[in-house]
Image (cartoon, rainbow, N blue to C red):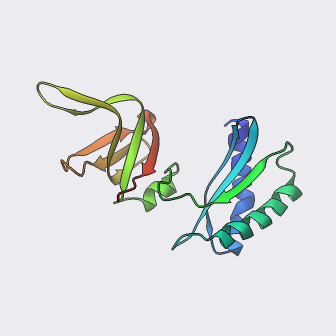
Amino acid sequence: MGRAEQIAAKAEELLVPVTESFGVSVYDVEYVTENNEKYLRAYIDKEGGVTIDDCENVSRAFETKLDESGLIEEQYILEVSSPGLGRTLSKDRHLEKSIGQSVEISFYKQMVIRENETSSIKSKSIAGILKAFDKESITIEDTETEITSVWQRSDIAQIKLSLDF
């Protein structure tokens, strides 16, 4: 685990009691560098969705906890928000809540997503209904063909909820 991941994990530990006190839950925490700026991003969630007031209240209380802890010594920007509709499913708890929902899977490289006796179709992404998952794999059902396929998690770069409009 790298330094950024360690900071994010420790920040999440600090955030959990804060979110519980406001009736929301931690969805994810990340510590990243973008354009030479450090960002600590905390994504919060609750049944029915989070409000701006939820984000503001959690942000103020979390900022105080972070300052008291001395966890991050360098200058950084704290952002507290909802994970959004097209949220990334990066943890098993995210996948568990998303069983039966439409997802988009992006792969690290092109994968054979369909094949028959004469040809194969390759793509770096596939969409479908999340059916199951375990430590090693993700199972989705193609909504057009109703074909179920199993993909190795080691081949998957990202899984997101699909926005169906």
Q: Is residue 28 left or right of residue 115?
A: right
Q: Quadrant of the image for the N terminus? A: top right
Q: Answer with the quarter of the image where residue 28 lies.
A: bottom right
Residue sitting at 35 percent across and 53 percent down?
A: 132
Q: Answer with the quarter of the image where residue 118 lies.
A: top left
**In the depicted structure, whether residue 86 falls above or below residue 24:** above
Residue sitting at 61 percent across and 66 percent down?
A: 25
Q: Using the image as rendered, state which of residue 101 and residue 34 is in the foreground.
A: 34
Q: Tell me residue 165's x, y (percent).
A: 35, 59
Q: Which residue ends up furthest to the left in the rendered image?
A: 117
Residue sitting at 74 percent across and 51 percent down?
A: 10
Q: Tell me residue 6's x, y (percent).
A: 71, 43
Q: Using the image as rendered, state which of residue 71 and residue 60 is in the foreground.
A: 60
Q: Is residue 55 left or right of residue 47?
A: right
Q: Tell me residue 9's x, y (percent).
A: 69, 49
**In the depicted structure, whether residue 1 falls above or below residue 23:** above
**In the depicted structure, whether residue 17 falls above or below residue 87:** below
Residue sitting at 20 percent across and 46 percent down?
A: 147
Q: Using the image as rendered, state which of residue 86 and residue 26 is in the foreground.
A: 86
Q: Is residue 136 left or right of residue 55?
A: left
Q: Using the image as rendered, state which of residue 8 and residue 56 is in the foreground.
A: 56
The number of numbered badges drawn on the structure is 0
Q: Which residue ends up furthest to the top in the rendered image?
A: 118
Q: Tell me residue 106's x, y (percent).
A: 41, 39
